[in-house]
Image (cartoon, rainbow, N blue to C red):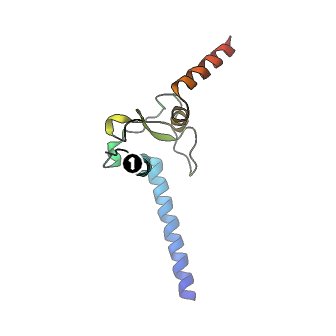
């Protein structure tokens, strides 16, 4: 009984240490996790995936190229400023020439709204500026 408890505690400690190591590595360079998530989505959606290693992804820019907000790797929970891997053309898969790293906020806006929706929102907001 005591042996099982010692083994369980040691396993939990190693698991926590591994999670901490992974979080720290992710903060330094989130591309590995971005690639892993993209691979899972590509399998789920049965789309092309040609990113053999995280180094096939572009470097994470300091600012989102679309919204010009700083890209920040958060703690456990993604935020609007989190880096996000975007397929430039959603009719194509994850290939080196079809990906960019943008903010989560920009990626959600891009994926949840059509161009026409964004245009309507822009025109509505512009009317309110007068």
Q: Position of residue 69 (x, y in %)?
A: 53, 31
Which residue does the image show at 42% across and 39% down from the upper left?
A: 60
Q: Quadrant of the C terminus?
A: top right
Which residue does the image show at 37% across and 37% down from the upper left?
A: 92
Compared with 16, 25 (above or below) is above
Which residue does the image show at 32% across and 49% down from the upper left?
A: 53
Categorize mark 1 by other alpha carbons within 10 Å: few (<14), some (14-19), many (20+): few
Circle 1 residue? 46
Left or right relative to 27: residue 123: right
Residue at far bottom of view: 1
Q: What secondary structure is found at the residue carrying circle 1?
A: loop
Compared with 74, 98 (above or below) is above
Image quarter of residue 6: bottom right
Q: Position of residue 38 (x, y in %)?
A: 42, 47
Q: Nearer the viewer, residue 32 or 40?
A: 40
Q: Nearer the viewer, residue 55 or 116?
A: 116
């Amino acid at each position: 009984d005591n042996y099982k408890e010692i083994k369980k505690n040691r396993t939990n400690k190693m698991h926590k240490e591994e999670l901490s190591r992974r979080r720290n590595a992710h903060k330094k360079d989130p591309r590995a996790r971005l690639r892993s998530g993209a691979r899972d989505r590509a399998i789920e959606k049965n789309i092309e995936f040609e990113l053999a290693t995280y180094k096939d992804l572009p470097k994470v820019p300091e600012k989102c190229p679309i919204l010009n907000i700083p890209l920040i790797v958060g703690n456990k929970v993604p935020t609007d400023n989190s880096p996000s891997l975007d397929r430039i053309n959603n009719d194509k898969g994850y290939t080196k020439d079809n990906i960019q790293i943008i903010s989560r906020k920009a990626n959600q806006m891009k994926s949840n709204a059509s161009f026409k929706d964004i245009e309507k929102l822009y025109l509505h907001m512009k009317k309110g500026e007068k």
